[in-house]
Amino acid sequence: MQRPALSLIIPVYNEEANIAELDRRLKDLLREINETWEVVFVDDGSQDRSPEMLHELAAAEPRYKVISFSRNFGHQAAITAGIDRAEGDAVVIMDADLQDPPEVVMQMIQKWREGSDVVYGQRSRRHGESIFKRSTAAAFYRLLRMLLPIEIPLDTGDFRLMSRRVILSMRALREQHRFVRAMVSWVGFKQTAVQYERPERFAGETKYPLRKMMRFAIDGITSFSIVPLRLATWLGLLSGLLAIVTSAWALYSAIAGQTVPGWATIMIAVALAASAQLIMTGILGEYIGRIYEEVKRRPLYVVADTLNLPPADRSPPSVQKTGDTPEASKKTR
């Protein structure tokens, strides 16, 4: 079977209110693309009618392909499943809530044809979001830039196009706690931006409330940065300096005859030591927990069924077939 020129990966979780409009706008986009294409929907254990609606669309359009998880494994796992099965020379990741406008894909394709391996959507404005959400998102991306040893473009999500050799490189990365946008930056290659205004959701509610956003931020930092571990050294030095100052003050008070019961000094010392220990124990626990998750070597997701897709390759995702190496799969223009 001939490989399509373009693959679209669309994670779906409880998006029944958006699927019909998404289908309409996708077909408008794909009619304009003078290339072969496929759309890989990944249903992430939806509890509404999303699975049935996707199967109806795929039954009518064989180039619509559906991967259904056995339960909810998360947005990043759904993206990974799409990457594992997408066959296009160029692969675009986009959300089903239409906050990643399908029309921007045409600009990404143009940049790819000009020689870029990764074309990421960079948000110039974010509509329909609270001041709190916008400000915390801006702070998060700037914190990542300071902590991570790789550069992640500011104000970007997972909405991006990747060339075939980037996709093959991504398939070899199988860590459990996934932060796809940082992984794409890590693999390198030529990367460029497309500016766009991010609209509000077409319908439904956000699937990333504050709790999930905090978890996502922790995954991003601890997956790519050891700076929090280095805080142990600096916090230990600071605690030591404060202990020296406290000891000097206590010694001076004793020599000057200003002795008081030692309760305050003891409590200060204990509080400083305990706070430093608890902070660093928590940070160490985050990293040890990730080691624990990795050594179990569980699969990143479990597929319940598929539609319009060939049987899955039984070889490990990191093993590439002969003739399907990054060098052999460089995009043709």
Image: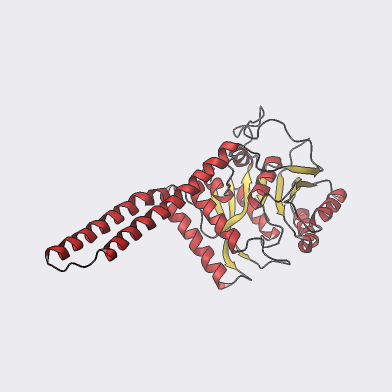
Where's residue 237, x and y in %?
A: 29, 52
Question: Where on the picture, by quarter, is residue 23?
Answer: bottom right
| Residue in the image at 29% along x and 60% along y | 266
Question: Where on the picture, by quarter, is residue 22?
Answer: bottom right
Question: Where on the picture, by quarter, is residue 4?
Answer: top right
Number of marks:
0
Q: Nearer the viewer, residue 45 or 3?
A: 45
Q: Quadrant of the N terminus?
A: top right
Q: Nearer the viewer, residue 246 or 173?
A: 246
Q: Quadrant of the C terminus?
A: top right
Residue 246 appears in the figure: yes
In the image as oriented, which residue stretches furthest toward the front?
261
Q: On the rendered structure, is 281 left or right of 196?
A: left
| Residue in the image at 60% along x and 34% along y | 326
Q: On the rendered structure, is 88 left or right of 247?
A: right
In the image as oriented, which residue stretches furthest toward the top?
322
| Residue in the image at 81% along x and 61% along y | 20
Q: Nearer the viewer, residue 228 or 116?
A: 228
Residue 195 appears in the figure: no
Where's residue 48, x and y in %?
A: 79, 59
Q: Nearer the viewer, residue 328 or 46?
A: 46
In the image, residue 3 sits, relative to residue 112, either above or below, namely above
Where's residue 318, x and y in %?
A: 62, 34
Where's residue 294, x and y in %?
A: 56, 39
Q: How is the image coloured?
A: secondary structure
